[in-house]
Every structure is written in structure tokens, then in C-alpha cells.
Image (spheres, rainbow, N blue to C red):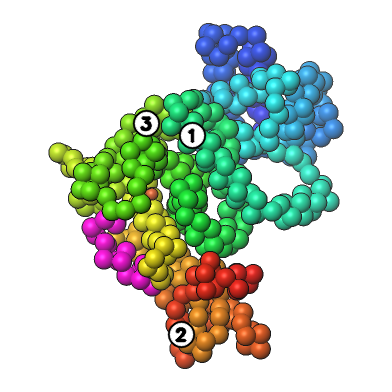
Amino acid sequence: MMEKIEQYIKKLITCLQIAKIYTSSHPKFSEGLNAAYESLAEVLREKQEFTVGIVGYELAYEREIFFELSQKIKSAIGVLKKKGIERITFTRGIDKEELLKFIEYLAIPETEEVREPQKYITAIGIRNITVGKIKSSADADKELKEKKEENIESYYADSVKTVETSIEDVLGGRSIDAVDFRFNVIGVMENLMKKHNEFLKLAAVKRYDATTFWHLLNVSILSMYFSWKLGFSKEDFLDIATAAIFHDVGKIFISRKIIQKPDKLSEEEFDIVRSHSALGAQILLKYSQALGIIVPLVAFEHHLGFNGKGYPKLSFEQKPHIASLIVSICDVYDALTQRRSYKNEYSPALIYEVMMKEKNKLFHPELLDSFFRILGVWPYGTLVLLNDDSVAVVREQNTYDIFNPIVEVVFPAEKKSHINLSDNRDVTIKRFLNPTSEGKQYLGFV
Ligand SMILES: [Fe+2]
Ligand SMILES: [Fe+2]
């Protein structure tokens, strides 16, 4: 095994050296790449994955150091160290394209902006190579502590800004830096996976901030969380999240150009609004290279409905893509919760009812059920009034009993406790408290 890995490393380094001289379209490069890839495949036939690391200035596999090899590849080791890479893991399933991208990444001169290497290589679509540092446990602890102290709220606000700029760029027909964009989405995704409760809580509060960009970020976070819980791969829910961010680009375009009136729309104007999905797809099609084809597809289909009876009206039958079905559920859900901040309040229970009426019509039946099983009828962080007039916050879902979550009583002080409403049938939710109006004084408890 040692020998085979050594062979592979040698070929990888040769290829890297070629990449520094020729472009990746040069035949010399493809020759080198083929050789490296074949020898990598040979190792991965025997092992599911393997990691090589840098210890000091030596290259190592498991506990063995390649002393001789390390001497020869000093400059390559230097390149890795400068990029902040101390270990590389290769996993079975890697294709030549991924190896090519990785080599290209390593060949970028060090003078160019250094980013977090793992995030970067994920952003450019490499799935079967991971890189990182070899850290002592003291370092790891320190890092964990720093991460904890990161302010999630300012992170959320930054993300809204990223969403805003990218959409402005798309609307203005400017090119967008796709790698940078995916980089940001990955950041949100990682934070969401680590601290999804904090994120969901924030989404529960920010949902009342009825601006378009918050809506887009909320739909994206919901879609991401939902598809993560459904078991999609990272790569897939990254695509779904991106599609969610852009799903209403057509609407923003139209509302700026045409409709900006507060009163009722005429039937004609409604038709124009309905054209936002096709228009959005048209705008986004130009970006399918950078953002992926799922993005215009979801924009096109997000109002089509599971039964295809929504809009745009099509002269042929088209089953919406699962990404569109997911985004459509999250979109309607978020739009209905936002309605609360206007005149008629929509309680979570009513939203559930309204959405259930569209089961098999607008919404895919199993997906809709899963959605409420995962999110609950009363989502995490919802402020509620109980039947004994105490105020509580939803803290956990009962997947087997979506109507009765676990709540924490926050007021009055003497009643403070956690209650599982599924086990305590005497205590029930009387109604929902809007955290921006009557529930405002309890916002600190959420
Ligand atoms: Fe829409
Ligand atoms: Fe929407």
C-alpha cells in the first residue's frame, strides 16, 4: 500500500508541475493527469479512502513518513503549507474532473487571495477530496470556542446582504462570481447544520421582517433544513438552497418595473405577476453555467404545482422537479407566516390547515407530510399562549405528534418549566403570540 501511494503522490506532483507550465488543455497535461488518476484509482480499488498528511516538512501516510519522497517534493509541500493544507483525504468515487480541479487549485500562485481551502474546493465542486489541518486538541478546543462566539444574528444579516448583492447583479445582467456565491451559501449551510436551532429561532423572528430579501433567505434556509433532514447529499441541498434564493427573481424584476401599488391588482396585473416564474427562468438561464441548471428550473416551476395545474400554463405535461416541489412548500409556508405581520393574523395551526388543503394539488403529498413532521405545526421558537394564560416558547418537536410540541413556560416566573404537551393533555396551546406585536415583551425569552 505504501508503495502504491508513493507512486500516486509522485505522479500527482509531476502533474502539478506540468500544470504550472502548461494550461490544462495541453496534451502534456492530460497525459500527466491520466497517469495520476490511474494510479489513484489503483489505490482506491483497495481502500475506500486514504489520507496523506504533512508532519513538519515530511509527507506521511498513517504513521509512516516518506522520507525519500519528501526530499524530492519539498517545493510541493511548501505549496500545500502556504495554502494551509496539512492533510488531504482521497475517497473512492472521485472522477478525473475532480482531480483536475484539485490540481488546478493547487497550481494557483500563492500570491492570489488565500481562502479557507476546504470551503473553496467544495465550492468548485470537488466532493471526493477533503483537506484540512492536522490539529492538536488544544487548537481544536480553541477553534470550537471561537466558533461559538461568532454572532449568529450578524451572520444572518450578512447573508441577507450577500443575497441582496447577488440578486442585484443578476437583475442588472452583471456576471456573478459563482465560486464566491457558493462559498457564502456553504457558510450558511455549515452554520445551519451546526446550530440549526439558533437559525430556526432567528428565522421564526425575522419572518416578520417582511422584506423580499429576508423572504428569500428564509425560504432558502427552510429548503436547506428540510432537504437536509430528508437525507439529501450536501451537494444537492446546496443546489436546492441556491435555487430557493433566486426563485422569485422575476417577481422583483416585475415589481420594480410595473406594479408598485398598494391596492388591489386588476386581473391583467395579476397575469403580469404570474409571468414572474417564466420571466425569472429566462433571466436565470443566462446564469445556469455559474449557478447550475436547477436554479432556472425551480424559478420556472415553483408555482406549477404537484398536479401541474398552477402556472405557467403549459401545453404539455411536466412533472415538477423535486427541488421545485420542496421550494414551493417552503415558499408558501414562509409567505403565509409573513401575512401575519399585516392585517389578518395567520396562526401556525391555520397555516397547517390551509396548506393541507393543497395536498395532492399544489403540494406533493408525502413531501408535505414530511415537512410538518420535521418542522412541526408549531415551529421551533414560536411564542404561544397556553390555556392557563402562561406564555411559552416551543423548544422541541414530537415527530409522532406534530400538534403537541415540547414547550418552555417563560412567564409568569413561578411557572417556569418544560412541558411536553403530548404527555400533558391538560395543558394546551390557546393561541399564537406575534413576537412583533403583543408578544413583544417576551421576545427576550425566544
Ligand atoms: Fe413566486
Ligand atoms: Fe416566493
Q: Is residue 398 visible?
A: no
**What amino acid does circle 3 point to?**
Ile
Q: In the image, is the residue at mark 3 within 8 Å of ligand 1 by its beta carbon? A: no
Dot 1, crowdedness within 10 Å: few (<14), some or many (≥20)? some
Identify the mark at residue 283; answer none if there is no mark: 3
Q: Is residue 445 visible?
A: yes
**What amino acid does circle 1 point to?**
Glu
Residue annotated with mark 2? 428
**What amino acid does circle 2 point to?**
Thr
Q: Is residue 279 above or below residue 337?
A: above
Q: Is residue 86 above or below residue 344?
A: above
Whether residue 350 is in magenta: the answer is yes
Residue annotated with mark 1? 168
Quarter where residue 148 is shown: bottom right
Q: Is residue 110 left or right of residue 190?
A: right
Q: Is residue 274 above or below residue 59?
A: below
Quarter where residue 268 is shown: top left
Magenta part of the chain? 349-363
